[in-house]
Image (cartoon, grey):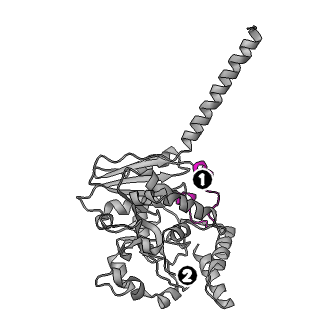
Amino acid sequence: MKKPLLTTLILLIILSLGLTTILFLNNKQNTIPIIPKPKNNNSINIVFTTDKEYSSYLKVALKSLILNKDKDSIYNIYILSIDLNKKTQEELKTFKQNDVEINTVPLKVKTLDKIIDKKINFFYVSRADLFKFFIPEMFQNFDKILYLDSDILVLRDLSSLYNTDIQDKYIAAVKRYNFRGNRKKDDYNCGVMLFNIQKYRKDNIAQKLIKAKNNDKDGRSSQYSFNSVIKLKDVKLISPIYNNNAYTEDEDFIKYNFKKTYSPFLDNINNLLELDKNTIIVHYIGADKPWHKNSNSRFKEKWWEYSKLVDANMKYKKRSFIERLKNAYFLTLRSSTKKTFIQYIKKFYHIFKTS
């Protein structure tokens, strides 16, 4: 074989190997990982998702969770993250202690983009929200796992929640009250979910959620996808003390149908005030977050108490005028309730002001 031809052949082989290696590494990097089962079988296994913006608020959630746990409880916490630098990941690991393990699991947005086409139109919802779909696949070596949103406070130990008998249901979750009458049927909130791993995987729920999200023209969060795929009859409904919605407007208190929604799940709790006193998890749903200056959230002061323990210099979050305008416009239009023009203006102004 002539020397130029041999050289060309060698270069082609090297190039081919190089491309194969790049493709392999890229594919490996964009694969959703399988998490090994923890050594301690008695641990309470918890998953959070977060990104660069929400990592500060996740720290507040972690602080409240750790301070309010029972001494005998062992927590094994996994943080699924996107866009977090090494410094932030190390900061999250500082919450580790003898009875609390912190595991950071960096994920790639590219992984999500290859599977899910549609985006999320809510500026207060992270793209990481969609990794909820894959939690049972990632934690397939577990029997169950507790998912928690980052915009929460944990005020008591989580053992009672984690030990809930899910029976033959896909998840355990809290029913949402229809506080504005704008939902045609009851649904549940996905900010706190206890997954029945094996049943979820057996019925291929992740693929059904992906399909539902990719068919969603409105760009809604995982909340819509879960409720369209896993119906209420397949959910183990649990007490609202495990996911107490802190979002409120004046009209919510007037229209709050407390007993109809929650009476089957409560013992000696007859109203919102009593629920607040017995709450285990506070959830700051919607655009109105306690770190916004004009927030009307219940438990706003409680959130700031814990935030100061994490960062004494924590500041209010400021959104741009355009972001707030877009969000108020989008959420006002999504309301299916028949309102007068003045009612729509009031709703628009409330969302704009508190976000």
Where on the picture, by quarter, is residue 155? bottom left
* Residue under numbered circle 1: 115
* Residue under numbered circle 2: 183
Identify the element where label 1 is drawn.
helix
Residue 229 image offset from top left, x and y in percent:
52, 68
For marks 2 and 1, the one nearer the N-term is 1
Kindly tell me whether residue 55 is visible in this rendering. Answer: no
For image coordinates 70% across by 22% down, the residue present is 12
Q: Amino acid at mark 2?
A: Arg
Q: Give the residues drawn in magenta, as a range.
A: 110-130
Residue 32 image offset from top left, x and y in percent:
51, 48
Q: Is residue 318 left or right of residue 99?
A: right
Count of marks overlaid on the render: 2
Q: Quadrant of the N terminus?
A: top right
Q: Quadrant of the C terminus?
A: bottom right
Q: Is residue 150 magenta?
A: no
Where on the picture, by quarter, is residue 214? bottom right
Residue 343 image offset from top left, x and y in percent:
63, 89
Residue extending furthest toward the left: 72
- Along the viewing direction, whichever of 264 and 82 lies nearer the viewer: 264
For image coordinates 61% across by 56% down, the residue present is 116
Q: Is residue 302 left or right of residue 318?
A: left
